Amino acid sequence: MHFWKKTALGISIFLILAPWPVIGLAKAKDSKLERRIEALEKIAMRQGVSNQVLERLIAQQRDPNEMRVYFKNGLRFDSRDKRFKYQIGGRIQADVNFFDPDSRFKSSIENTANGAEFRRARFFISGLLYNRVKFKAQYDFVGQTSFSDVYIGLIGIPIIGNITVGHFKEPFSLEDLTSSKYITFLERSLPSAFTPGRNLGIAIHDVLYDGRATWAMGYFRPTPSAPPRIQSEDGGSFSTRLTGVPVQRKNGRQLVHLGFGYSFRTSDDKLSFSSKPESNQGPVTVDTGDIGSEDVHQFNFEAAVVIYMFRVQGEYTLVKVKQFSGLPDIDYHGSYVMVSYFLTGENQNYSKGFFGRITPRRNFMENGGWGAFEAALRFSTIDLNDGSAGKIGGKENNYTAALNWYLNAHTRVMFNYVRAHVYGAPAVNRGHLNIFALRFQMDF
């Protein structure tokens, strides 16, 4: 017993003392670095060296591979020389939906029961390696785990600009390319049924004139999201988008945004277009069914104006489908226009062709603040009827009112009221539907 007591005492002393040489070395290294910095500061004071030069001299004394950890719209890790950067983050969106259909809608369209869901629950890691290679791996854990943005890219290539390869959104439509963290309404408008979304592909893109112009183009293959792989001979697509800001004043608080998108896709099988009434838990209200097609041309026109707290934004999308066997071409179209106003004086942030994060002037419960409040209205429409081609998928007009409460830059509560009017389809797809929706959102 005496032997085991001695052994235990010896092990305890070893565990206590063992780290001290390492700690001592680390402290010695830090102490040596601090002495060099103090010496530099004294020399700078005597020689009258500017603060900028002094900061550069101090930075040269530090290990360039040393990582700085901080929070800026997510947890970030940067090397001292900025050649390596990493970010970890995610988002949670919890929705509650209440549906109030009229008698005609209720008798013709099923699945309008009230409900709640996690709309998105995503986690990502992104970064920059050697100041030239970027990457991002983002997954959504709602339902079956699925790919969101998973890509690798090269930046700063002469003439070309940037190259991205992987699973990401095709360059098409301002609203679709705006992150779900920043969209004004719970769901994107009805014409989003036409947007190609995320697929597997390669794109080249760049930003010009200090961020006032952007261009992007890429080739993509239609890809399921869980997991994305190509296993068929289905057609591919070419998509491109150009944007410009002809007017920009007051540090972006006054601006005019214009954009154009085009997408051409081929298909060896069938395609279809359908839409829900701007509620993910709502039923499908307009649907073309399967269409045998050779190729599809899609054109998108976008515009936005920001004047301090006020913003107006709209898009128009035209789709032309070429059918098999010499059947007549089909034309579909959709559009939306929205206005928003910040009651507390903020404005929608804009950068490099996209709208981004809202930062309240005063956060909720900080220095008497209540966060930021935004009121918005939107009208959207989609027409999936082409009588000349014999394709009747229905028409829909939606009127949406929204109130957004931004508690801080990373937390918001959203309320939407949607009045959906479905018509122009077979009798089983007609009527009015009122939707009351609430979202609790946090990103990190």
Image (tube, rainbow, N blue to C red):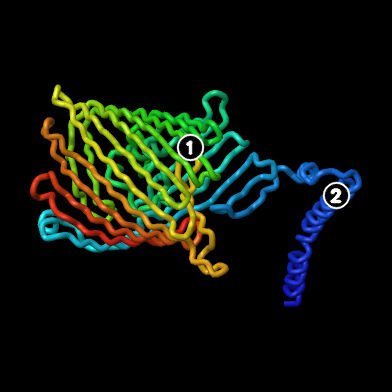
Q: In the image, is residue 76 above or below residue 151?
A: below
Name the quadrant containing residue 80: top right
Please name whichever residue, 137 or 294, is drawn nearer the observer in this view of the structure: 294
Asked if residue 130 can be seen in this view, the reply is yes
Mark number for residue 412?
none
Q: Position of residue 433 (x, y in %)?
A: 19, 57
Dot 1 or dot 2, earlier in sequence: 2
Q: Is residue 379 left or right of residue 14?
A: left
Q: Position of residue 299 (x, y in %)?
A: 31, 31
Q: Is residue 266 left or right of residue 414?
A: left
Task: Kindly state the secondary structure of the residue where label 2 is placed.
Answer: helix
Residue at label 1?
247
Q: Is residue 397 left or right of residue 263?
A: left
CB under 8 Å between discs 1 and 2: no
Determine the residue positioned at 62% across, 36% down.
130
Determine the residue positioned at 53% across, 51% down.
88
Is disc 1 surrounded by few (<14), some (14 to 19) or many (20+) residues within 10 Å?
few
Q: Residue furthest bottom?
A: 1
Is disc 2 surrounded by few (<14), some (14 to 19) or many (20+) residues within 10 Å?
some
Please name whichever residue, 159 or 432, is drawn nearer the observer in this view of the structure: 432
Residue type at the position of mark 1: Val
Please name whichever residue, 25 or 370, is drawn nearer the observer in this view of the structure: 370
Q: Which of pointers 1 and 2 indicates the residue nearer the eye?
A: 1
Name the quadrant containing residue 31: bottom right
Disc 1 versus disc 2: distance between alpha carbons?
46 Å
Mark number for residue 41?
2
Task: Kindly state the secondary structure of the residue where label 1 is placed.
Answer: strand
